[in-house]
């Protein structure tokens, strides 16, 4: 599988010398992988290429990296400059708040940039199950937030959905509000709770998501707080997710450099390839390239099938 063409469906770049990312300038409290001080360094195309050198990366999708929220379009403009100089990324999942007075203005401005294919806007969530009112401001149940979400269809933008496991059941209702909009579940729905009860909750919610035709899923970010990356455990989750959604609705992604806190890029993709070594070539191409290319509307040269 060394020649397998890969579209990395989710990664991040940042230049801490030139731009402002508040979360990378703050203390490390509360991050889902614990101490993330190792991320507080520049991460640019040269770093990405060095870390992914053992694989055939044919395109990448940059997902917003929590750039200064007072300048939401600024990250898009910066990435366009990076792409012009370094030939990556190939597409952008940008940011816009859904519950602000200027939501439509920001969405229109993002959509005016040809590299922007979708939006990731993290709703307000509870730190634990049952700790947030269903209609709390900025949450998925907030009518104002939902109104902003529905504007994605107007601008032909997909929605990258990132919520903790315990909010996945709420997200099913949200997905049904936007049947014409592609919804991309980030990070395999974050199966953080690997207990039998936690995995049952994840499984039920993901099955409900799989029943919605507009939903695809990124097979990514299996890291856990204070635990090493476990191949066998993560393989079982990957295979179960593929069984629920099918290869045509799943895409592998790196979430680098964040995932690098637990596993390096090259080792991660070797693990992915090993997990699906028995799949057909067409299924492997779907998982590593085609689902991402279709979802993010990438025009790729040639066909390495």
Image (cartoon, helix red, strand yellow):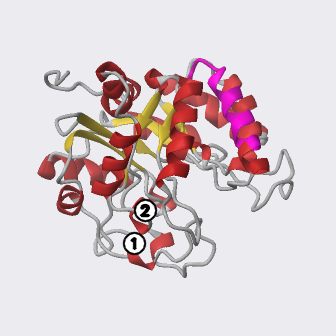
Q: Spatial distance from mark 1 to mark 2, Cα to Cα?
A: 7 Å
Left or right? Give the position of 208 relative to 254: right
Quarter the C terminus occupies: top left
Viewer-proximal residue, 294 or 262?
262
Stretch in magenta: 200-215
Q: Residue at x 16, y 35 (%)?
A: 3
The quadrant in which residue 303 appears is top left
At mark 2, the secondary structure is helix
Apparent side of residue 54 relative to residue 31 in the rendered image (left or right): left
- 285 part of magenta stretch: no
- Say if 205 sits above or below 131 in the image: above
Q: Position of residue 235 (x, y in %)?
A: 49, 44
Residue on which the image places disc 2: 258
Evaluate whether residue 144 shows in this view. no
Q: Which one is nearer the viewer's eye here, 24 or 10?
A: 10
Identify the mark at residue 39; answer none if there is no mark: 1
């Amino acid at each position: 599988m060394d020649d397998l063409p890969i579209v990395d469906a989710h990664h991040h770049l940042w230049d801490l010398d030139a731009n402002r990312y508040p979360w990378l300038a703050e203390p490390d409290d509360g991050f889902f992988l614990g101490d993330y001080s190792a991320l507080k360094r520049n991460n640019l195309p040269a770093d990405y290429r060095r870390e992914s050198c053992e694989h055939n990366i044919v395109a990448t999708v940059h997902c917003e990296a929590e750039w200064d929220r007072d300048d939401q379009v600024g990250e898009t403009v910066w990435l366009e400059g990076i792409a012009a100089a370094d030939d990556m990324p190939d597409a952008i999942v940008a940011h816009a708040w859904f519950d602000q007075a200027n939501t439509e203005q920001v969405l229109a401005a993002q959509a005016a940039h040809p590299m922007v294919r979708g939006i990731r806007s993290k709703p307000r969530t509870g730190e634990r199950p049952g700790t947030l009112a269903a209609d709390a401001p900025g949450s998925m149940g907030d009518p104002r937030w939902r109104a902003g979400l529905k504007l994605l269809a107007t601008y032909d933008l997909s929605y990258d959905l990132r919520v903790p496991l315990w909010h996945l059941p709420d997200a099913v209702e949200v997905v049904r509000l936007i049947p014409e909009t592609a919804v991309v579940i980030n990070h395999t729905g974050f199966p953080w709770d690997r207990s039998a009860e936690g995995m049952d909750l994840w499984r039920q919610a993901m099955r409900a998501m799989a029943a919605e035709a507009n939903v695809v899923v990124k097979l990514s970010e299996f890291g856990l707080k204070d635990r090493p990356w476990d191949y066998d455990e993560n393989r079982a989750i990957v295979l179960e997710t593929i069984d629920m959604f099918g290869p045509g609705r799943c895409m592998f992604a790196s979430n680098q450099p964040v995932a690098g806190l637990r596993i390096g890029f090259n080792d991660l993709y070797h693990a992915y390839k090993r997990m699906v070594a028995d799949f057909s070539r067409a299924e492997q191409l779907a998982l590593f390239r085609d689902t991402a290319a279709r979802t993010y509307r990438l025009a790729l040269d040639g066909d390495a099938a």
